[in-house]
Amino acid sequence: MKILFVHEVSWFNKVVYEMHDFPELLSLNGHQVHFLDFDEGRPRAKWKPVTTTETRAHNGSQVSVTTPPRFLPGIFGRLLATIIQPIIFLQLIKQIKPDVVVTYSIPTSGWQITKICNKKNIPIVARVIDIPHVLRESHFNSLVRWSEGYVFRNSNFVCTHNETLRQYCIGLGAAPDKSSVIYPGIDMSRFFPAPPRQDLLTKVGIQPTDKVLLFMGTIFRFSGLVELLTELAPALHLDKSIKFLILGDGEDFNRLHELAITLDLQSQVIMPGRIEYDLLADYLRLGHVALLPFKQELVTHGALPGKVLQYLACGLPTIATPLDGLQSMIPPNKGILYANNSQEMANIAIDLVSKPDQQHQLAAFGLDLMTLHCNWHTQLQSIEQMIASFQRA
């Protein structure tokens, strides 16, 4: 089949996650896969789109990635993209004649592309992995929410990665009988339990006898890391062998770094920044206990954070905020201990990081769950069957 994916983020600059996995794995299964992205950084082209064949996560895959021109910086470039991206989309569908379109895009081009597909009788699937209108604070939130509803009502099918998010989409007009949950997969040939690499321990300043708490991912305003570090501070001062390894960058990175200095914890709070995908699993395996301290908001309750699945696949017992979407997939004690607030999370973390036997028991449950629910063979088969159903209609 010829499948065209559309997203409003950069294929090249975004951390690797399912927006790369599904297209690349589908290409390895023999499908002709195209991807229309949006350059969030500097322009990759001045006057015309650039199309290249790319691979980021799965060797041997071939995804044709088209990046529209970007003429203006910041929000002005994003606003102009609401016009440019649909124009490029029209050119692409005329050129490649896709059998189906899969869109992750909602605020930038979601409703426009959905409308085009409806008029051209091209089946369109909305793959929904977050709630865009609350993901970032913006003056355009009400318009983004309207776009969500338009896409959900007018797509041929809506596919989410957890039941809580599916119910949200139904609440905005998605048809219950034309929606489903397909969990994201985990590359378990890459993410698996293994001893920590000594060279990486040395590089980040962790001793083999240290006890390591770990967070990985984009440091959003709702990440809850500032509040958690504040609660962890007394225990870190008492026990210098406890380290807090924070992998990633984002809007709250500087505030968090400054807090570590203010609390005189810069030797124990280790923030190496964003880690390249090829090294990510090795860095995760430096930890003993992983953390997800997200604040409880609409945006986080609808999420199924991929970082948690990678934690569990690497054999890391995890302590997380009880988010609805996460709990719909992973019940308590099946790899995850849930904590209702940052103080409770800090207490549980300090206790668990000193109990290797309990860590191993909890980790085993999580690994079993990942093997059952997040193996790529099953998830890819589900996506293929859903897409193929439009061919039989």
Image (cartoon, rainbow, N blue to C red):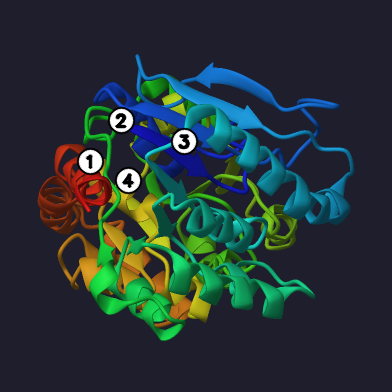
Q: CA distance from mark 2 to mark 4?
A: 18 Å
Foreground mark, 3 or 4, reads 4
Q: Nearer the viewer, residue 198 or 183?
A: 183
Secondary structure beneath disc 4?
helix
Asked if disc 3 and disc 4 are in contact, CB closer than 8 Å, the reply is no
Q: Earlier in the sequence, mark 4 or mark 1?
A: 4
Foreground mark, 4 or 1, reads 1
The percent position of residue 362, horizontal first and vertical second, equals 16, 58
Foreground mark, 3 or 2, reads 2
Is residue 347 visible to us here?
no
Q: Amino acid at mark 2?
A: Leu
Image mark for residue 380: 1
Residue at x 74%, y 61% (from the top left corner): 262
Image mark for residue 205: none
Residue at x 63%, y 46% (from the top left corner): 249
Q: Earlier in the sequence, mark 1 or mark 3?
A: 3
Asked if disc 1 and disc 2 are in contact, CB closer than 8 Å, the reply is yes
Q: Nearer the viewer, residue 96 or 158?
A: 96
Disc 2 crowd rating (10 Å Cα; few below 14, some 14-19, many 20+) is: many
Residue at the spot of label 2:
25
Q: Earlier in the sequence, mark 2 or mark 4?
A: 2
Image mark for residue 310: 4
Secondary structure beneath disc 1?
helix
Q: Earlier in the sequence, mark 3 or mark 2?
A: 2
Count of numbered circles in the view: 4
Q: Is residue 264 above or below residue 21?
A: below
Residue at the spot of label 3:
206
Q: CA distance from mark 3 to mark 2?
A: 36 Å
